[in-house]
Amino acid sequence: MSTTAEHHEHGLSDSGYVKIALILAAITALEVSTYYVDFGPLFMPALIVMMIVKFVMVVSYFMHLKFDNKLFSFLFYVGLGLALFVYFAALATFKFFIA
Amino acid sequence: MAETATHADQAHHSSTGLSNNKLAMWLFLGSECLLFGGLISTYMLYRGRVITGPRPNAIFDIPFTSVSSFVLLMSSLTMVLAVTSAQRKDDSRTNLWLTVTALLGATFIGGQVYEFTTFYREGLGFTTSLFGSSFYSLTGFHGVHVSLGIILLLSLVGMIKKNKITGNKAEVVELIGLYWHFVDIVWIVIFTLVYLIPS
């Protein structure tokens, strides 16, 4: 099977994965730039969005959830969703989100 | 012989047609979200509570941690290349990429050991403040996961070399790959929430 094919039976080609890694590296560079450049009120939302984009890209492409059976996505995202719900509730209890 | 191999390949598949091993791994990773969620939210709650010792912004070395993060991110690329090599039944390339992944992971751990040592010398011990306790618990737990991943990778390299894997070799590599990518995504979250967003 050719490694340059657009799609393998189970995911992207090797060059496709390299492209994803380059995009992730570029986003990381952008994240680090927020340490040196003042993004003003966009600082926090930009960092959160970039973090979510990187997270979803690794899970979807490197962990193959985009190409795999939806049951795997269900198992993982239910765990993640439960964790987010429980800990947002816990942080809210401690008034974490109130300045 | 081929019939035996095919039977071994199918032996761990459930009535859904999916691999039981893979289902178990995804369920495990889902539950790991709860573990790291607890550690991350505890850190978020306590990072500003510093009575004695240095504050987060005073000791974090963002350029150094950025390089460590980049190294761990690239180890996810080499891991996925190991998986594709295993799917092509190319054992030598699979072992090469697995070894590179383990080396990148070891580099990350080396960086973490250096960081912890530096922080300790600057006055941040495990019991210095709530910030110190929650920071070392979170990043330490992550470091233990990476270390376990390195042991798994190197064991896998040895097993492939000695041809000790029975059944679907590509699936075994993929399962360890899933674990490895998980420690990477946890670090993506830690890097942003712990290091880049000031307390």
Image (spheres, coloured by chain):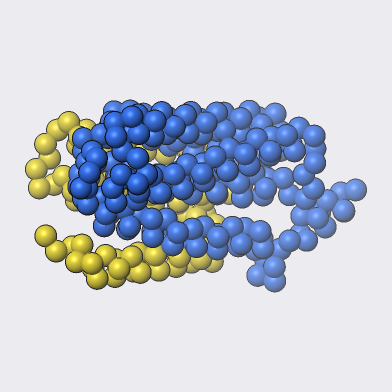
Identify the image quadrant of residue B115.
top left
Q: Quadrant of residue B114?
A: top left
Q: Residue at x 72, y 45 (%)?
A: B169
Give the color of chain A as drawn. Answer: yellow
Picture coordinates of residue B112 (x, y %)?
A: 42, 34
Q: Colour of chain B?
A: blue
The x, y position of residue B196, in whole percent, is: 25, 41
Q: In the rendered view of the protein, which quadrant contains the C terminus of chain A?
A: bottom left
Horizontal relation, residue B117 to residue B80: left or right: left
Is there any visible trace of residue A46 in the rendered image?
Answer: no
Which residue is drawn at the image coordinates 24% and 71% (left, top)? A93
| Left or right placement of residue B169 versus residue A76 in this view | right
Identify the residue at horizontal 78%, vertical 61% (top origin): B11
Q: Foreground residue, B99 or B146?
A: B146
At x 55%, y 33%, the residue is B101
Rendered location of residue B149, percent (x, y) = 57, 42
